[in-house]
Amino acid sequence: MTPRLLVHTRTTGFRHDSIPAAVAAVRTLGDFDVDHTEDPEAFERTLDGYAAVVFLSTSGEVLTPAGRELLAAYVEADGGFVGVHAAACTECDWPYYGELLGARFAQHPAYQPAKAVIEDREHPATAHLPAVWHFTDEWYDFRSNPRDTAHVLVSADESSYEGGGMADDHPLAWCREQGAGRVFCTSFGHASEAYDDPDFRAHLRGGITWATGVGRAGPF
């Protein structure tokens, strides 16, 4: 059976122009059936049947109290969760969400090219990438380092760009377990062009696939 995803793109803060391209990309990755919503009431109904929930450049407070409860219960009971780019700027009033994601957005410098260092060359989100990945994006800084509670997949080489704020240990993408569930977070994906890039599309597909639990041999 093809895994089904619930892709959420509601914004109550900054709205990325890349959201339509991002949704189209997930629909065309080829491995998933996709339901797309911006309706918070979608999370007040059962999430049974979804292999993963994807927050795709969401921002601000995007869930109702009932939706928060249902999403947390879903992940804790073996659901998958994927946070892409501005998902780290979401649900700032909900402490559990920060725990779920692993880190919250702090700031970013200008959109610019830089080097990303691949820390795990076997994970499905990164196995296709070279040891150093040259990419152009917003290089998010986070309020805390997720490394203590997550398995880091990609980190930034801050010497390769201007304005980094996390020094020598700057995670950009990671995965972690929450209860019985699986969480994949990537800070990449600011611009529409990213969603046409074969390496980024494979990164996104691999991370989503891991979060669904399909073919997963181990925790990471």
Image (tube, helix red, strand yellow):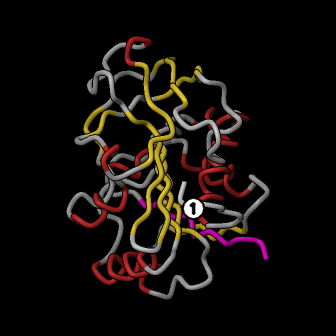
Is 141 placed above or below 29 here? above
Left or right relative to 59: residue 124: right
**Residue at figure coordinates x 70%, y 71% from the top left:** 3
Does residue 126 belong to the magenta stretch?
no
How far across and how far down the image is residue 113, in percent?
51, 17
How far across and how far down the image is residue 87, in percent?
41, 52
**Residue at figure coordinates x 37%, y 76% from the top left:** 72
Is 182 placed above or below 74 here? above
**Residue at figure coordinates x 40%, y 67% from the top left:** 178
Question: What kind of element bears circle 1?
Answer: helix
How far across and how far down the image is residue 108, in percent?
33, 30
The quadrant where residue 48 appears: bottom right
Residue range in magenta is 1-10
Left or right relative to 209: residue 64: left
Q: What residue type is labelled 1?
A: Ala
Task: Looking at the picture, tell me which residue is in the foreground, 110 or 53.
Answer: 53
Task: Looking at the picture, tell me which residue is in the foreground, 99 or 198.
Answer: 99
How far across and how far down the image is residue 169, in percent?
33, 28
Task: Looking at the picture, tell me which residue is in the foreground, 62 or 148.
Answer: 148
Does residue 7 belong to the magenta stretch?
yes
**Residue at figure coordinates x 23%, y 41% from the top left:** 143
Q: Which residue lies furthest to the front in this view?
A: 218
Return the residue at label 1.
211
Task: Looking at the picture, tell me which residue is in the foreground, 8 or 75.
Answer: 75
User: From the image, which quarter does the N terminus lie in?
Assistant: bottom right
Is 188 placed above or below 68 here? above
